[in-house]
Image (spheres, grey):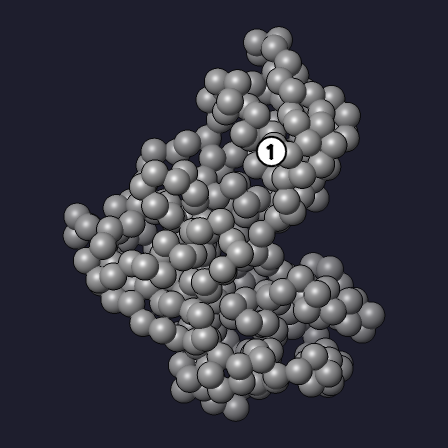
Amino acid sequence: MSENGLLLRVCDTRRIGPGVKQLTMVRQDGVRLPSFPPGSHLVVACGADTGRRNAYSLTNAGLDPDSYTISVLRRPTGSGGSAWLHGLRAGDTVLAWAPRSAFPPVAGARRHLYVAGGIGITPLLAHVREALRLGRDFALVYATSDGPDGPHVEELSRMCGARLRIVRRRHQLMAELAHRLGSQPMGTHLYTCGPEPMMEAVLDAARAGGWPEQRLHFERFDAALTAGAPFTVRLRRSGRCVEVPKDTSMLDALLNDGSHTSYLCRNGVCGECRLHLVSGEPEHRDFYLTDAERADGAFMPCVSRGRTTLEVDL
């Protein structure tokens, strides 16, 4: 596990939507916090003894920030991380790690079209702040079943004015997309984040409309579950073999074997546990690596698995 953490102190909490709590945190030692580009996430330790680490999108402006702000949707059926964060109060401390850029804007884009669903608004909120600061041309379509009570709707309405369109139903979203995707100037880039079915619908509509892949950008919340067929991992440096059961992640199998493997989020979104794959057929499940990185042998053991015996550079 990476030990280069930041000890943060919660300085403000507030409810910003049904089941959504906003946490604002400053550095406990008073030192200035690292800057970050829009679309970055903060990996947070959810409790001192659980070992659970969740990644949350930073929603505030990232240029020389004096605080970090995240919005946490409480998930009753989750692993407990969101419930723990919802229990925090001003003055409590949180261990986190420096922001990581996973979903940045394209600086040279002629226009930016943002499409968010539910809590997927969080990374795009930072995008909007940056676009406003730099005078970039943009529009935001926000699908939320809570309508005007949705997370950050009030704030976005003040910030965006006529550039914001709120929709509550799927058919409204698809109608809006049909209009928007066909009327953007050449050089517009599309960014989407939200529930998987919504994002697939957005991306499918864009592709059907002739949008090239290099102008489509998306961020998912979590990778697939660890369950899958058992497989074997061969450690090249030691020559040892580690068995990975069907209900255990490769990362956990390596840690249980005593291998020193760095990790943070365990969700396939932060890149910390990246390994080099020497041989074997992988089943990639992360949402961090590019196709080119995967082709070059990069592999994320926290969520990805092997279809055959894998050999890694450990």
Q: Residues within 10 Å of mark 1 (few under 14, many from 20)?
A: many
* Residue situated in front as seen by the camera: 60 or 283: 283
Residue 287 place in picture, x, y as percent: 62, 49
Q: Circle 1 sits on which residue?
A: 249
The amino acid type, in three-letter code, at marker 1 is: Ser
Quadrant of the frame with the N terminus: top left
Which residue appears at 77% of the width and 25% of the height? 308
Q: Nearer the viewer, residue 79 or 299?
A: 79
Q: Is residue 27 visible to us here?
A: no
Query: Looking at this view, is 70 or 313 the one in front?
Result: 70
Judge by depth and name the residue closer to the eye, 251 or 112.
251
Q: Quadrant of residue 167?
A: bottom right
Q: Is residue 309 above or below residue 53?
A: above
> In which image quadrant can residue 171 be found?
bottom right
Work out whether residue 291 can be spotted. yes
Q: Residue at x 73, y 60 (%)?
A: 213
Q: Residue at x 44, y 70 (%)?
A: 19
Q: Position of residue 14 (x, y in %)?
A: 31, 72
Element type where label 1 sits in the image: loop
